[in-house]
Image (cartoon, helix red, strand yellow):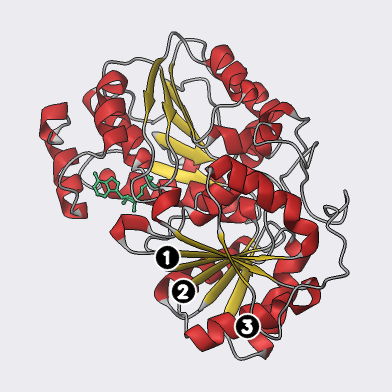
Amino acid sequence: MSFKSLGLSEPILRAISKKGYEEPSPIQAKAIPPILEGKDVLASAQTGTGKTAGFTLPLLHYLSENPKEKFRPIRALILTPTRELAAQVHANVKDYSEFLNIRSTVIFGGVNQKPQVATIRRGVDILIATPGRLLDLESQGALSLKRVEVLILDEADRMLDMGFLRDIERIMKLMPKKRQNLMFSATFSKDIKKLAYSILNNPVQVEATPENTAVEVINQTVYRVAKAKKTDLIIKLIAEGNWKQVLVFTRTKHGANRLTKKMISAGITAAAIHGNKSQGARTKALDGFKKGRIRVLVATDIAARGLDIPLLPHVINFELPNISEDYVHRIGRTGRAGASGEAISLVSADETTFLRDIEKLIDQKIEIKILEGFEPDPNASTEPIKQGQGGRRNSNPRGKSKSKNSGQRRRRRNN
Ligand code: AMP
């Protein structure tokens, strides 16, 4: 199948070919036709599938083929859970609209709102926003959503995880009832389905799993280790392996900061990325990591979600996530695009239950290694870490993978 056969206009095809895309990805092939027909779409797709172009290309086609007033009211709203994702989506929108008379901008918290307001005042067709800043600016009268024709919820599951349900409900009330709605989500919990029913109108459902991120193709290893030895072990692995681009996951923001400092002291360039970092610091860290100036990026799950970092050779879980699905999301960042990837987890005694849950979810035993000098502590308790000691928790840490969807959702905006 070609992009042309999907019926996209010439300026859009030109932008696509400038990006070097040869054919639509599966999610694009499935989602673009119904979106072009003006239907509501519920799409199951995560980062890496090409989902952003999947909704952006037909959106641009519609807006440019149906031009409206010169003063440019906001005609399309793309909501994303994180600032990073918002910035990435905006970069994509700009690339794909290079040859069109379409204006777009992005707004998110943590940065000065003045330039954002000024850009909106000049008129934009497409607004990409995180919920908090959007509501802020709307309540100040800096923008209106009364002319929105297309609403896109990107990574809807993460938005719910981060406690944005109320905000989303408030935003819905600010838009006209008659509009096209597109919802993209990696997972489909009960809550997501409920949200979909409340927003989408008779939606067409499409689905695609990312290529090359299948758990089976990733080389997974667990190092059993005493908790107190984890930092030394991770530094040894990275230094001796001479690994260059390593994404490390920690459970908490403080844990990320602590580990980053230790790495830097050991002579490994590292940066932390999480919700407490300023937007500038996050952008700088990500940029440095992508360009190879920073060897190790230490991230919490939420900060890492949605980051478009292709071809990561190494992912390390400094701590196992207590939500098994997060393990799959984390390690899915390696082994992309056919490159071999390695996912390593440092597991102390108190994470034994998490490891068992993960193995159950992926239906696979992970190879276990123990390095001399870094043996697990034989006296350590195998009880899972107690509430409050880590970051976000399952309501039922012993629960199966389902527990993510059934438990009370905690507010995770701060992670
Ligand atoms: P996304 O899932 O939207 O974050 O996209 C993942 C990556 O795939 C991005 O770097 C896109 O630039 C790239 N991409 C999107 N569509 C295509 C395509 N049809 N062919 C090749 N690469 C693509």
Relative side of 151 to 238, left or right: left
The reply to whether the C-beta atoms of the residues labelled 3 and 1 are less than 8 Å apart is no
| SS for dot 3 | helix
- The residue carrying mark 3 is 235
Q: Position of residue 371 (x, y in %)?
A: 64, 80
Q: Nearer the viewer, mark 3 or mark 2?
A: 3
Question: Taking 7 as reference, is 314 above or below it?
Answer: below
Q: Is residue 36 left or right of residue 397?
A: left
Which amino acid lies under the numbered mark 3 shown in the image of this protein?
Answer: Ile
Per the model, the C-alpha gap separating discs 3 and 1 is 18 Å
Label 2, residues with CA under 10 Å away: few <14, some 14-19, many ≥20? many
Looking at the rendered structure, the kind of residue marked 1 is: Leu
* Label 1 secondary element: loop
Q: Are marks 1 and 2 in contact (CB under 8 Å)?
A: yes
The residue lying toward the viewer, choosing from 217 and 75, is 217
Q: Nearer the viewer, mark 3 or mark 1?
A: 3
Marks 1 and 2 sit apart, C-alpha to C-alpha, by: 7 Å
Q: Earlier in the sequence, mark 3 or mark 2?
A: 3
Residue that label 2 marks: 245
Q: Position of residue 265 (x, y in %)?
A: 68, 89
Q: Which residue does the numbered mark 1 point to in the structure image?
A: 312
